[in-house]
Amino acid sequence: MRYEWKKLLQRRPIRLVLIGLFLLNATLFYARCTVRSGGFSPADAAKKYDRADLAAEAAQLEACLQAGGCPEDSGLVTGDAAAELALDRALLAEKEAVAQYPDYLRSLLAEIKARLQAGFSGKPGDWEYRAQKAVLARYQRLLPLRPSPSFGEGIAVFSGWFGSDMILLLALLTAGLLLFPEERTSGTLLLLRSTRYGRGRLFLQKLTTMLSFGFCALILLYGTDAAISAVVLGFGSLARPIQTVPGFLSCPAPLTVIGYICMAGLEKLLWLTVTVCAAAFLCAWARRPMHAVLFAAGASLLSIFLGSARLPWLQCLSLSTQSDPSRRWSACRMLNLFGLPISEQTAFLLCCGLLLPCFLFGGWFAFCRRDTVTPSRGPLSGLPIGRHTCLGRHEARKLLLGSGGAVLLLLLLAAEYGLCMQLPHQVTDYERYLRGYSAELSSGSDEENRAFLDAEAARFAKLQEEIDFYEARCSDFSELQALTAKQRRELKAQPAFEQADTQYRSLRPGELYVHPTAYQRLFGPQGIQNDLWSTALLGLVLSLALSPCFAREQETGVLTLQKTAGALGRATRSKRHLAAGLALSAAIAAYLPQMAIIGGTYGLARLYAPAGGLPVFSAVPGLRIWQVFVVAWLARFALSAAEALMILALSKRLRSTVVTMLISMALFVLLPILLLLF
Amino acid sequence: MELCFHDLKKNYGSKQALRGISVSLREGVYGLLGPNGAGKSTLMNILTGNLHASSGYISLDGEDVRAMGTRYQARIGYLPQQQCYYPGFTAEQFLYYIAALRGMKKPDASRRIDELLDHVGLSDVRRKRLSGFSGGMRQRLLFAQAVLADPDILVLDEPSAGLDPKQRIQLRNLVGELARDKIVLFSTHVVSDVAYIGRRFLFLSDGALIRDGSYAELTKPLAGKVWELRVPPEQLEAASCFGTLCAQSRAGEDFLLRVLSDTRPPFPAENVTPSLEDVYLDCFGG
């Protein structure tokens, strides 16, 4: 096993990448603890939690804000009165929730009993009934619990942080690539397969190395997270019930905080074991490093898909769901095992017990039973292609066919289309109303539009008055509903009206009203999130396609022939031009589908209008909407080209496809995904 | 055409891989012989531009090759010791790629590729992927790529590695044919590969040129020093220790030994004509 460890850590770039990932995790987790979101950060909450005068301060802040503004007070933790008020309210709500726990538990038990008695959970012999009885029994054990408020954000942030899992997965993929497909491509597998002790033992040694590597990485990453959380936020008393921690109010187990940490740790270790076996399985089947990465990407997508499935058992089989102990322990969910209600924790153990031997056996079979050398029967080898002396075309063939650039572009397009289809694109009633108002406000003069808005506001006010009138006089609910049906139907347009009204009234001189939905979708918070996903996918495609660009020449030895022929410069220029072309094509494939689908569904209205007329573009008042698109696309192309150039530079410098791929993925895939966590 | 090495040196840290090699080459085959680590590959890499010399220079027809740049590169063909190829390419595609690197025009490349594939016996498998080739087939293909652009200087590093005896002879004959108007530098451990076709032989040891001459010039000093002995099995051990053992074979019940010795061995012995292998063993020991 010592030699397998040496294979993992013998290359300096790999060691640097692993150290870099560790530091990145620490930095991002620290930022998670200290960066303000919604006005305050967990660190701010930690400073104020134990103060006894929170309620009084909140009342004071509310009063002065209502009065029109609070004087600057350096004593505020957040530095802003509104944010301070939000912080105070959040802390008070948290404390109250914990203090009210016995009442909460009693109401939960009462609700379950009511459901059982009312027959909403079926008849006494039914599975649903027995499951609810089991839930009732679990919660009833907690009746003696009397938790007192204690700052729990440290534990909540620590248990809710997924960045370490992402980095751990990349580290495991690194180990898998170096121990399996890298051996195959470098040819050392031919030497290793004939061993005194057999291939099975060799496979176990590699697997054990990956496990120990994963274990060390887990300890380092989570240990650092725990240390940062403990220092910056604090864990509070570890002997208190876990129900005092935000998000765990509905935990059905009588665990203390330290008890939960231990349980979660053990579950994490089990998840790690299953994931390592899965990684070994995928990497053992892959003939080339790129295949292993694509398998891993596919497995990740499958995992996410399973995790969002409606069937609980499918969710349980998802490795991404399995990685989150807090999800399992924050509520009491029962699953149906052949008519027997079992807890989610038990289901997790069963699923791990099912997946583990499957991955183990599959990986063993792939490594030990399959041929090391297989005759390569390419589908294109019989075709008369490549019979020319144009160096650029040869390099293009190497990039698009040899490195799989063409297939990767198609996969990117398909993935983007699939992602776009996941987002809601139906034209809702709200959208229909908004379109109506947008059509009205996009024509006519300013006076006419303002008169229209005033008239609509008055109409809604009148409708509300009529509803209030009937509510005051009618005690029968169904009669009231019948009487006010027309008014309520018309009032459905009010939220859309209010948005259109706010947008119109905030227009500056020279600005035009523009229907905002498509632009909000493309450039608002959801649009930025989608862009980050697209950027991660783009990074993956470029990493896989371009990593072999220069490294492969060194690995195959053809670099010598290029140098001897005096054609190294021409070949290099060719590669750079092709890489730029690939980067631009990939950028189009990554970002265009979303724009096309959203634009097609909601319409890109008035592209010539000043961008400042839209709330989402209020920070860019000097440009027109079409110019914003041009700038956005230029930025995307520039980012894509920069990524491509960096990957080429890495490939040239490092001269190893696997190492280049890993570093590129850390920079251009992992980073956007981690940013999504913020 | 004259290719000259002028006091060529190469250092790797404190280790001197080449210690001032100076030699002048004209058309013909030059055997580059020496044990592992002698500096043969280093010399070849410097000649082909894959390595920079620490000091000294190479000139072609009086001009420094560094100043010539791509004009020099265009006149070199190289068969490296390590097999370099793209596994996913077919033989034909690989040669077209090399032709593209060499800046050849398609009609010339097509004609030349057809010719060479025929010469090296790979016409039948021209559309087969290189990953499916045997080692010998790849070696023949790599020889074809080295001569594809009809270079003036051909550098062959262990060209017969992986070839069967018939193929080695074919290769030897092909090289001999090509060498009429080229400078061929042929590095090998198999002395017989180059003995019959070589014009001159350069013996390298520990980075230095220790012997340099034609077959006749090199073997003349060993005249009268190479002996063939026939000994019974019980005398084999004693006879083996006498002088430098060059070869050993069975002749019926007895053993036939070829030894290098200044004095006549105390066994029934006959003087034989020295060969290049004897010269090799004389330089580097048995």
Image (cartoon, helix red, strand yellow):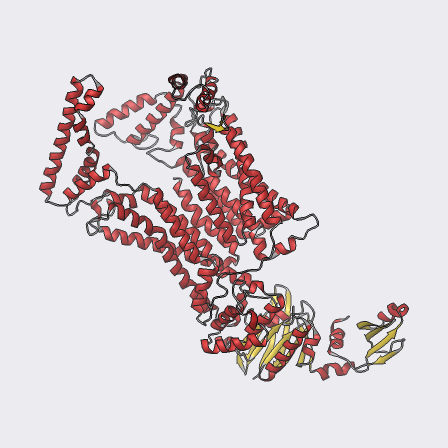
| Outermost residue, top side | A144
Visible residue check, residue A672: yes
Position of the N terminus of chain B, as image quadrant, is bottom right
Residue A173 placement (x, y as % from top left): 52, 46
Q: Which quadrant of the view contains residue A219?
A: top right
Rendered position, A522 above or below A37 = below
Task: Depth check: give the residue in front, B33 or A169.
Answer: A169
Residue A55 placement (x, y as % from top left): 32, 21
Residue visible at 28% across and 26% down in the picture:
A61
Residue A204 placement (x, y as % from top left): 63, 44
Residue B284 placement (x, y as % from top left): 74, 71
Position of the C terminus of chain B, as image quadrant, is bottom right
Rendered position, A498 above or below B170 = above
Give the left or right position of residue A518, taking residue A315 as reference: left
Task: Depth check: give the residue in front, A410 or A164.
Answer: A410
Q: Which quadrant of the view contains residue A250?
A: top left
Give the left or right position of residue B47, taking residue A606 as reference: right
Task: Depth check: give the residue in front, A496 or A659.
Answer: A496
Give the number of callouts: 0
Rendered position, A54 above or below A312 = above
